Amino acid sequence: MIKPQTPNIKTFYKGQLIFKEDHESNVAYMVRKGAVNIFRTMNQKKVILDCLGEGEIFGEMGILAGNRRTANAEAAEFCELMVLSKPVLYNLLNQCPKTIQFLTKALIRRLEKTTQLIPDQVYESSFLSVCQLLELYFLLHQRMPMEERQRIQNYDLGLSYTHVCKQIKSIILVSQLEIDTILKKLHNLKVIEITNLKSQKAAFPERYITLRDPATFEEVTNNLHKELQKTSFSLTTEMEYVDIFEFAEEVETTPEMLYKKMSHGEVPETLLFVHKQRGLEWAEAQDPDFFKKVKKKKKSVDELEEIDDIVYVDSSTLKQVFEKLGYYKLGVLMALAEDDAKKKIMANLSRKIAQVVEKEAKGKEFVDDAEAEDVQDELFTLVRSIKGAGK
């Protein structure tokens, strides 16, 4: 049963429309509970641009810019929304530092011009809007007071890729795929620099963005936009994507091989996308610890290929194999192995031999691919030989 509504709280059923495209922008909303879909109807198809969750605000740009709604909003599930009136929004803005107020107003003016120029052409409007937002965020980043800089991790590397994408999506109607495509194009053309920072705690590196020449960025991107309009480049083709099964067929491999390469970080994370709403719905149905640990699948002897598969081999067999391999080859295996495989190797060596093998591994930071393959092949050939002899 729907709760009685208070003056600044509204509730919506799943699928209920919150506001429609081209309607007047009277109020904005903040999601207190549930989720909201932002979508447009293009070519008689419903295109979901974003799915917003608790704590996120939407509908604010129409009020601040004095424009009509540029998209539709509907409840993705039962939700409670806090209503933010125009005076409330301006009060919040006036509490911000003067620099942020200036940049916000400048941003609104630029976006208003962009929307008026080409409101229905996704690529053109998205490209210019993303570039303008990126320039303003980078300018704000450079003008940040020293005490605020010190609180931001890796400030000197530039704008956090993840954070700036989230900010852009909260302001304009653009998907992550569109942003990634535009930023990749700017990077390839040497207009921006994208730095990858690897972390042991994360599967993929953190990325940071800097403008190569902030003083000429606006002029360069405007000229680039004009040039791209003359070419066949468009987000329609750039954003065409397939599922993993079709992609496997295209590259003449199997989905299982692609999964393995993903787990090893060999596939760029920019190629991996998840439908936000469906992904979150699926995640909610999993056990609480589902994303905290990996359930290891057992492998048969014939499926063993890489050093990390050593965790599937029993200790008795490994001790026999290690006796035949010798210190040098064990050092190669240790240099190639991830944490679990390293622990498995060390657990099946005596303390004295383990120390020697560790020293061998430290001297092998870069192992030749051919040598690595040969040593791994010999390892599993011995394992199969021993396991076969025991049958």
Image (cartoon, rainbow, N blue to C red):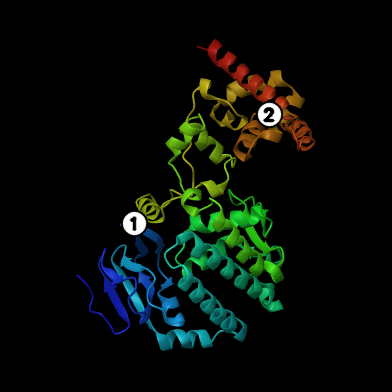
**Res. 10 in view:** yes
User: Residue at the location (46% across, 80% down)?
Assistant: 65
Q: Is residue 376 left or right of residue 9?
A: right
Gap in angstroms between the C-alphas marked 1 and 2: 66 Å
Mark 1 crowdedness (10 Å alpha carbons): few <14, some 14-19, many ≥20: few
Residue 287, image x and y in percent?
38, 50
Q: In this view, does 307 lie to the left or right of 109?
A: right
User: Residue at the location (30% across, 72% down)?
Assistant: 18
The residue indicated by pointer 2 is 349
Return the residue found at the far front: 230
Residue 104, image x and y in percent?
55, 79
Q: Which image quarter: residue 261? A: top right
Please, is residue 175 above or below residue 248 in the view? below
Q: Which of 346 and 42 is in front in this view?
A: 42
Mark 1 vs 2, N-terminal side: 1
Asked which secondary structure carries label 1, the reply is loop
The residue indicated by pointer 1 is 43
Mark 2 crowdedness (10 Å alpha carbons): few <14, some 14-19, many ≥20: some
